[in-house]
Amino acid sequence: MVRTSLSLFDSKLVGPAIADSFRKLAPQTQLRNPVMFVVYAGSILTTILFFQALRGMGEASAGFIFAIAAWLWFTVLFANFAEALAEGRSRAQAASLRGLKQTTSAKKLELPKFGSNWVPVPATDLRKGDYFLAEIGNVIPADGEVVEGVASVDESAITGESAPVVRESGGDFSAVTGGTRVLSDWLVVRVTVNPGEAFIDRMIAMVEGAKRQKTPNEIALTILLIALTLVFLLATATLLPFSLFSVDVAKLGAPVTITVLIALLVCLIPTTIGGLLSAIGVAGMSRMMASNVIATSGRAVEAAGDVDVLLLDKTGTITLGNRQAAAFIPADGVTEQQLADAAQLSSLADETPEGRSIVVLAKQRFNLRERNLGQLEATFVAFSAQTRMSGVDIGGREVRKGAAQAVRSYIESRGFAFPAKVAQSVDEVARNGSTPLVVSDAGRVLGVVELKDIVKGGIKERFGELRRMGIRTVMITGDNRLTAAAIAAEAGVDDFLAEATPEAKLKLIRQYQAEGRLVAMTGDGTNDAPALAQADVAVAMNSGTQAAKEAGNMVDLDSNPTKLIEIVEVGKQLLITRGSLTTFSIANDVAKYFAIVPAAFATTYPQLAALDVMRLTSPNSAILSAVIFNALIIVALIPLALKGVKYRALGAAALLRRNLLIYGVGGIAVPFAGIKLIDMMLTVLRLV
Amino acid sequence: MTAQALLTIGFFVVVLIAAAYPLAIFVARIADVSPIRGVAGTVERFLYRLSGVDPAQDMSWPRYAVALLLFNALGALVVFAVQRLQFWLPLNPQAFVNVSPDSSFDTAVSFVTNTNWQGYSGESTMSYFTQMVALAVQNFLSAATGIAVAFALMRGFARRGAPGIGNFWVDVTRSTIYILLPLSLMLAVIFMSQGVIQNFDAYKDARTVESLTYPDPKLDAAGAPLKDAQGNPITEPATTQTQVLAMGPVASQEAIKMIGTNGGGFFNANSAHPFENPTPLSNFVQMIAMFLIPASLCLVFGRMVGDSRQGWAVLGAMTLIFVVMAVVANWAEQQGNPAIAALGVDQTHSATQAGGNMEGKETRFGIVSSALFATITTAASCGATNATHDSFTPLGGLVPMWLIELGEVVFGGVGSGLYGMLIFAIMAVFIAGLMIGRTPEYIGKKIESFQMKMTAIVILVTPFLVLVGSAIAVTSEQGRLGIANPGPHGFSEILYALSSAANNNGSAFAGLSANTPFYNSLLAVVMWFGRFAFIVPVLAIAGSLARKKRIEPTAGTLPTHGPLFVALLVGTVVLVGALTYVPALALGPVIEHLQLHAIH
């Protein structure tokens, strides 16, 4: 859905944004941003001074006051425009979501089972606890949980992923989202949310920024900006008495005008960051959205930047989903082919990916053809939680394969011994990070099949990057310690949690948090919910259960566990953009002082011209150039505010050095050039 | 700039650090709240029993702040009362009358706030009893208060999830008896060896070789100077061959005046007086004494938070700004005065003369020791002077003024320098932390909106007091009356006075007649709020930090040691300090400098 990538200044967005910039001139809107409110008040005051000047009672030429007043209004409008543009982009994203909220009609069931009578009702009439039927071709009318049936569902509207997904009752794939479409079969679904609270509604609200509240860090930064604004208000307001006194003692010139003081004030207060702060926040949410993650609050996006520990599920995140058979390791007195034969027999009816991979390996190694169980008159023994083994019975043979522990107790219960050499092979395989499966035939242990986890390509480099960012990666797996350790080493994670139970996960998160660390994790199952609720940044897979989604503070529409890394980067980018523009804004003041201070007191102390290092044309052009620069820099930085400062996975010191050089030193240098350039243009155009 | 200047500055820094390091190890033990056992703790334990203090009690920050404010308010009352009653009190051989209410008020606040702004002249106003019991006692207690706040803030960083920040009574008691008293005793002995006097004698008459004609202030029946309508003393010419030599217990007070960064001189001439600061050696020791505790507290900070590099980084930032400023001041003073050069006077440095601008300087100290002393006394919020800052060249005078306006964080006052600098560090990491994409943290403590709120108050207090105070002074009739010099220098004098008071420095551009009810009241209010409206939010930060968890550093944590952080901290101090005062300074020392060089 968010595939529609909008260029920054898309004409579809710019028009409404300009209109919004004027709408935002309402005083109550301006009051929300204290820094820009000062500019707003200054604009009004200079406008009044302009009218006073028109009536011939002005403190300076009407033209000059008009120019200052006009550019102060532009400053306010530019800041409004930045915010409006960011909101416009978000709204465009939200609009594409809203397209999903077509008024669908639902087949409301009278009884919660397939075959019961249904009545057509508008989707908006469905309430929590109602049941509906979704059949082939139907659009699912509301978020809910499948209680009966299996169906393939097209969720591309939400996830952008074109491959259909299977939804079925029970387990971790029981949640369906309103707006998606059933492609085959049917589902009986219990509605889990009331209209207006549905997942899609929350997404729209978030993206539109309708409920956007200031995040903790944004509040802290605003406090700092207000403090700086007050300091500069003091510095400029007291200049009037100082200037009156100076005129008195120097017996020369005229005191500084209110217009110039307002110009100085506006140039000094951090308008650049003040004007762009809200746009940066909106754009941050927007960027999260662009990577198909919906955050339930801005706070969560910000916290993502702070994460120190990532808990990553092994399967699907670090390794490819399935383990594959890699080797046959026979017991003493057994040939490899005998082992392969028995292993293949036991796996013929085993439709799990592991089972299939054993059949494939046997064929590769010994060209053993697939046999038909029916022809062999064999009975398949399915995997059960009690035996934890599967296999076949053929005549007198009882071929079994299973975890080493399970096979050992099975063998020993029949009075046979478990060969020491096999036990040794089991350990070796496990130590290599693979999973050992032991194969036995009627009490005789034949050997071990090595099932190997395939670590995803490039994941190790990714973790190295995270380490440089100061983020610890922890692999979570249900495997035993040995297996886990080997995979952890291969994948390059910092730590692992083996034989993980939901309780162990929760405990681990609490333990990290007690050390003062921020923990991020992904999860999809209902049993992940407690851990998700405990984690600081919890990303639920969209394919996961409703419980998981409720517990998390973000939902990844792509259900891609690796997404966590991108989320962290977006969070960091948000903070970096704020910090960099604050630094830039404050550093700008140096050049503005050099432009304005000599100009403001030119009549009283002409010697101050020595400070005018830019050699500006006249006092008036100096002040005007500084004000124009101050306004234009907001526009110039809108793309940066919306796109965010590029994040680089560098160590903290290197990153700071880099950003300090660009935004600190650059912030000092740029306005010297900018003000001089504007001054030259004003002079050439004979505007001053 | 002479080789002597560079060598002196270099030598000074080396000696300072060599002395501060061992002191820091000792002070870190004092800052530790665990009781001092055995004989060493006898006095301390006795004092607690006497005053009913439970030294084991841990105070929350509001409690700590209330104790601190009460203690200091009480101190101010005592100093006020002693001055108002000194005529009837002992140790008053010159029979000085009671000090006027406004001057007593100003002086009481001044000494309690560690400012030691002196509107009065010591040898003609204060009895020995007042000097010792009122002023010297506050020299100790105001310094101890500063150290206590610094300890509290250090604990804020060091503690994890703790409800309290220590016990104010314990911190003040320990700072006084273990740090300030022994150091003062050592210094007093050194000063006496150099010729600083220590007696209770009446003033002595000496017969001078030449007879001298001077303007004699007329006194009224009570012995107070008569003033004309403008508040200036009425004088008449007098001739004499007798010089009165003021006496007193000077060495003991001189010691704490320097080591406690108080700066209130026994005599009006302060450290330029030969009985206060007789030799180059005593001058050097005084300079070291001003920076000693502030420097060592930086290292104590490092030790308390368990990472000594943190302390060195803060000390490094302070040293960097200080050295640059000392060099500028020296350079400016050595340049001399173009107005005098225009008259054909040779002001160059040579084997036979110091050269440079010698106006208002003692010949026994010369350019280097005067300019360096001025830099140190204003970098530290000491305010002792061995030369007249008013007579410095405009740029030479800008250095002390600007150092004060930075907020007294370049070494700064005892305790106050460190806590002031740590507030700047919090601000620096806040912005820098964002620039690396994390919620800012310093020493493992997250800096969030409450800390920023308090930091905002702290950075607003002093500019508010300085700028609004100066504005009132230049606007009001009484404020303008005190100005002695015409032109922008008059403005510099007022700006300096307000900067000095608000930042609790206490030094003055002489030339401003500040012993008037107007300035006494204005400055007293400014000093009080400059001190305590700063301390309370600092304690609030300390309390809120102590409650936080401490996060172990990772590769993603902004390192707050090393050159990058030092540069960042220096940049923050300089930028915030400069940006606030640039326009005001432009109308004072900067234009003075430009005019002086434009004319000649």
Image (spheres, rainbow, N blue to C red):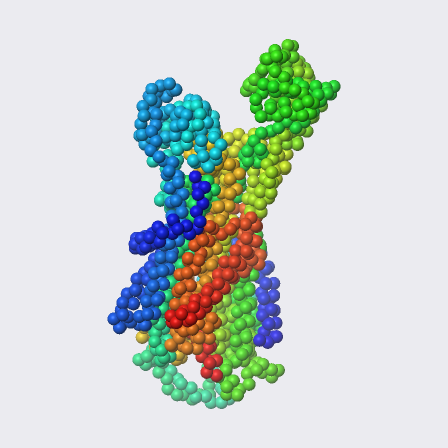
Q: To which quarter of the image does residue A357 belong?
A: top right
- For the point 43% across and 45% down, which residue is it? A286
Residue furthest out toward the right = A333
Residue furthest out toward the top = A395
Residue A11 in percent (x, y) is at 39, 51
- Which residue occupies the foreground of this view, A548 or A535? A548
Residue B448 in percent (x, y) is at 44, 50
Quadrant containing the N terminus of chain A is top left
Residue B447 vs A251, above or below: the answer is above
Residue A428 is left or right of residue B91, and the answer is right
Query: Can residue A236 be seen in the rendering of this structure?
Result: no
- For the point 48% across and 35% down, which residue is it? A161
- Which residue occupies the foreground of this view, B315 or A269? A269
- For the point 54% across and 56% down, which residue is it? A658
- Which residue occupies the foreground of this view, B248 or A339? A339
Residue B331 in percent (x, y) is at 54, 75
Q: To which quarter of the image does residue B499 belong?
A: bottom left
Residue B362 is left or right of residue B88, and the answer is right
Query: Can residue B288 be seen in the rendering of this structure?
Result: yes
Residue B283 is left or right of residue A640, and the answer is right
Residue A364 in percent (x, y) is at 67, 25
Residue A371 vs B420, above or below: the answer is above
Give the total of numbered labels.
0
- For the point 34% across and 74% down, which residue is it? A255
Quadrant containing the C terminus of chain A is bottom left
